Image (cartoon, helix red, strand yellow):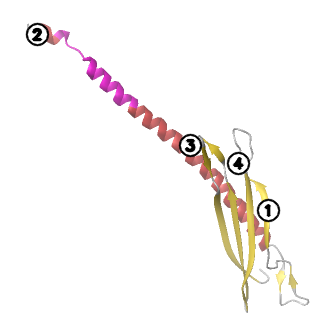
């Protein structure tokens, strides 16, 4: 009688339900990990594009002629603040452009030797994603510049 019962034995309903629940939790974790990774990759691409835009503003300021020891003195750089607005160079599946605002400030650090600080703050936001507002985010670049460099 013991041998016949061993041949007909199988999984009980409780064992099947528990194994399906464990499998479902594992698949849910894998899918969540994939979605989170895609979200992080998207954020990283926007952040890199914003950093590039901030660096572009710094390079524009660095290209201005500034030579106070020339005759006559040349100062195309000036101590100023200005704003640029541009689109982040990242393709989107929805086709909507992501706009960023580049705040560029130039301030004098010292006059002898002549030294100025160039600062660019690129502010951007992605908008709504899964019902949550994402942003604003800021990428900053700060550098120093001497005369005629």
Where's residue 111, x and y in %?
75, 90
Where's residue 28, x and y in %?
44, 34
How dense is the environment of label 4, judged by Cα within 10 Å: few (below 14), some, or many (20 and up)? some
Cα separation between marks 3 and 2 = 54 Å
Furthest residue toward right: 72
Report which residue position mark 3 lands on: 38
Q: Quadrant of residue 113?
A: bottom right
Specify the segment rendered in magenta.
Answer: 7-24
Q: Nearer the viewer, mark 2 or mark 1?
A: 1
Cα separation between marks 4 and 2 = 69 Å
Report which residue position mark 4 lands on: 90
Residue at the location (82% across, 77% down)? 77
Secondary structure at numbered mark 4: loop
How dense is the environment of label 1, judged by Cα within 10 Å: few (below 14), some, or many (20 and up)? few
Does residue 74 appear left or right of residue 59 in this picture? right
Q: Earlier in the sequence, mark 3 or mark 1?
A: 3
Q: Earlier in the sequence, mark 4 or mark 3?
A: 3
Characterize the magenta stretch by its predominant secondary structure.
Answer: helix
Report which residue position mark 1 lands on: 84
How dense is the environment of label 3, judged by Cα within 10 Å: few (below 14), some, or many (20 and up)? few
Residue at the location (39% across, 33% down)? 25
Where's residue 39, x and y in %?
57, 45
Q: Earlier in the sequence, mark 3 or mark 2?
A: 2
Report which residue position mark 2 lands on: 3
Q: Earlier in the sequence, mark 1 or mark 4?
A: 1
């Amino acid at each position: 009688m013991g041998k016949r019962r061993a041949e007909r034995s199988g999984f009980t309903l409780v064992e099947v339900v528990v194994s399906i629940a464990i499998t479902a939790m594992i698949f849910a974790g894998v899918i969540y990990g994939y979605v989170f990774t895609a979200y992080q990759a998207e954020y990283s691409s926007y952040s890199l594009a914003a950093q590039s835009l901030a660096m572009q503003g710094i390079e524009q300021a660095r290209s201005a002629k500034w030579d106070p020891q020339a005759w006559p003195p040349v100062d195309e750089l000036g101590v100023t603040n200005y704003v640029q607005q541009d689109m982040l160079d990242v393709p989107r599946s929805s086709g909507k452009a992501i706009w960023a605002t580049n705040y560029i400030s130039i301030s004098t650090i010292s006059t002898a030797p002549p030294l100025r600080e160039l600062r660019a703050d690129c502010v951007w936001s992605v908008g709504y994603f899964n019902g949550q507002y994402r942003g604003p985010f800021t990428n900053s670049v700060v550098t120093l510049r001497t005369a005629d460099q």
